[in-house]
Each structure stands twice: as C-alpha cells, then as structure tokens.
Image (tube, grey):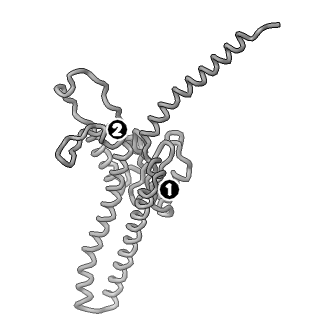
C-alpha cells in the first residue's frame, strides 16, 4: 500500500480468492491504475507493473507478455543516430509480487503514420498505457480462447443430439448452453466497463499517471519558491520593524 498508495479494498479486488466477487473494473488512483479484468489483474504505476500470484499457471502468460512487450519498448542504441551523448530515456519495470523485475522504457520507438511517415517519440504512449494495453489484450484473448474451446466441444455434441435424441445428449447440450451464457455475461461485463471508462473524461484522465507526475514535479518547486519568498518577506518585515 505504501508503494502504490492504494486503499485495502483495491488490493482485495486483486486477490485471486476474492476477485470473482468483485466486478470487472479499471480504476485510476492517484499513483496507480488497478486492473481487474478476468485473469488480467495488475497494479500499474508510471514505472512498473505489479502482478499478484505471478507463478499461477493462469497468470504466467500475462507476466511473460508484459515482460516481452514492455522490454521491447527499449530502442536499441544507435551511434549514428546520436552523434552527441544524450541521457537515456527513463526506464520502467514490469515486476511480479515475488520481486522479479523486467526493464522497460516509458516511451516507445518511432511509429508509422497513415502516410508512411515516421512518428516521433512524442506520439508514443506512456508506460502505463502500454502496460494497460497488454492487460486488455490478455483479457480479450483469454475470453476468445474459452469461446473457441467451447465451440469445438459444442459441434460434436450437437451432431450427436441430431443423430440421437436422448436424455444424456440433452443434458450435455444444456451444460454447454449454460457455459456459453456465462461466457457471454463475462464478455458483456468487460465491454460495459470499457465503454463506461471511455465515456468518462475524468476516469480517462485519472489513468494518465505520467502526466500527473510531471505536473506534480512542476508544481512542487514553484510552491517551494513561493513559501521561500513569503518567509523572506516575513524576515524583512521583522528586520525593519522600528524599536521603541
């Protein structure tokens, strides 16, 4: 909690034993973004990703994907492209709750515009949005995989029911239908959460952790300067106070 500034209720929502009782949600806090979408559960800050139970077989693919895609954001050094030494871009990390660390850059390389023109670094997404993109992709792929698996199971059962109507075949079809309804409900919950998030400008702004950190860094020195000036004025006032 000290590391991310999150309240206990947000951390409970990420507990694998309790997350099923919490609705799908993407919540922006002061210093972190809490992601709870299906198996994609993570705490994203401006420089790292914390994944609960990273050794869980269902979570290992997410950790692997985070490491691969966030680490690939670090552009390779090119002496020809940089004739004079310059500071390296800020680095983030993708880490699990067990302390495993994977370096990643806050900013990606150049992209390609609609006319084939290269996009500069100013067009790259901040680290937290890159990590959020990985989590969303993982959640959608998980649902897609479950749907494909159910579809492969459903066709033989339906063919069997067509050739022979029996209590056993009807029960198998009923079970598959129940699973399909459950998956459809989970897909709808994720869709509703994304639509709600995209429709709310305040919630979207809360996800921009890098911008909030930059703003705080800019405001803090100016506030310190104002307090310093006020203190100096107070000292001068007492210094010139006439004595009786």
Give neighbour class at mark 1: few <14, some 14-19, many 20+ (Cα, 10 Å).
Answer: many
Locate residue 235: give its quadrant. top right
Q: Mark 1 points at which residue?
A: 13
110 up-or-down from 22: above or below: above
Give neighbour class at mark 2: few <14, some 14-19, many 20+ (Cα, 10 Å).
Answer: many
* Residue lying at 49% horizontally and 34% vertically, measured from the top left: 216
Q: Name the residue under label 2.
A: 106
- Left or right relative to 75: residue 15: right
Residue 93 image position (x, y, % from top left): 36, 39
* Residue lying at 55% horizontally and 53% vertically, measured from the top left: 9
Quadrant location of the C terminus? top right
- Left or right relative to 18: residue 64: left
Q: Mark 2 to mark 1: distance in Å? A: 27 Å
| Dot 2 or dot 1, earlier in sequence | 1
- Left or right relative to 5: residue 49: left
Disc 2 secondary structure class: loop
Q: Report the number of discs.
A: 2
């Amino acid at each position: 909690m000290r590391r991310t500034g999150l309240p206990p209720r947000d951390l409970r929502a990420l507990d694998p034993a309790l997350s099923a009782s919490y609705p799908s949600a993407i919540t922006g806090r002061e210093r972190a973004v809490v992601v709870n979408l299906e198996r994609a559960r993570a705490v994203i800050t401006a420089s790292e990703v914390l994944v609960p139970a990273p050794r869980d077989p269902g979570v290992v693919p997410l950790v692997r994907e985070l490491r691969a895609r966030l680490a690939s954001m670090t552009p390779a050094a090119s002496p020809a492209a940089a004739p004079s030494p310059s500071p390296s871009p800020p680095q983030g990390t993708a880490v699990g709750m067990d302390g495993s660390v994977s370096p990643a850059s806050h900013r990606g390389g150049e992209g390609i515009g609609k006319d084939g023109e290269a996009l500069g670094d100013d067009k790259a997404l901040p680290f937290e949005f890159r990590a959020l993109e990985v989590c969303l992709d993982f959640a959608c792929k998980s649902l897609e995989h479950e749907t494909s698996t159910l579809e492969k199971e459903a066709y033989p059962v339906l063919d069997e029911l067509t050739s022979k109507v029996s209590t056993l075949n009807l029960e198998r079809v009923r079970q598959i239908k129940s699973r399909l309804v459950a998956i459809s409900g989970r897909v709808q919950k994720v869709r509703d959460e994304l639509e709600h998030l995209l429709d709310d400008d305040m919630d979207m702004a809360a996800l921009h952790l890098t911008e909030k950190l930059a703003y705080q860094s800019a405001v803090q020195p100016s506030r310190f300067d104002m307090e310093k000036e006020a203190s100096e004025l107070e000292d001068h006032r007492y210094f010139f106070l006439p004595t009786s």
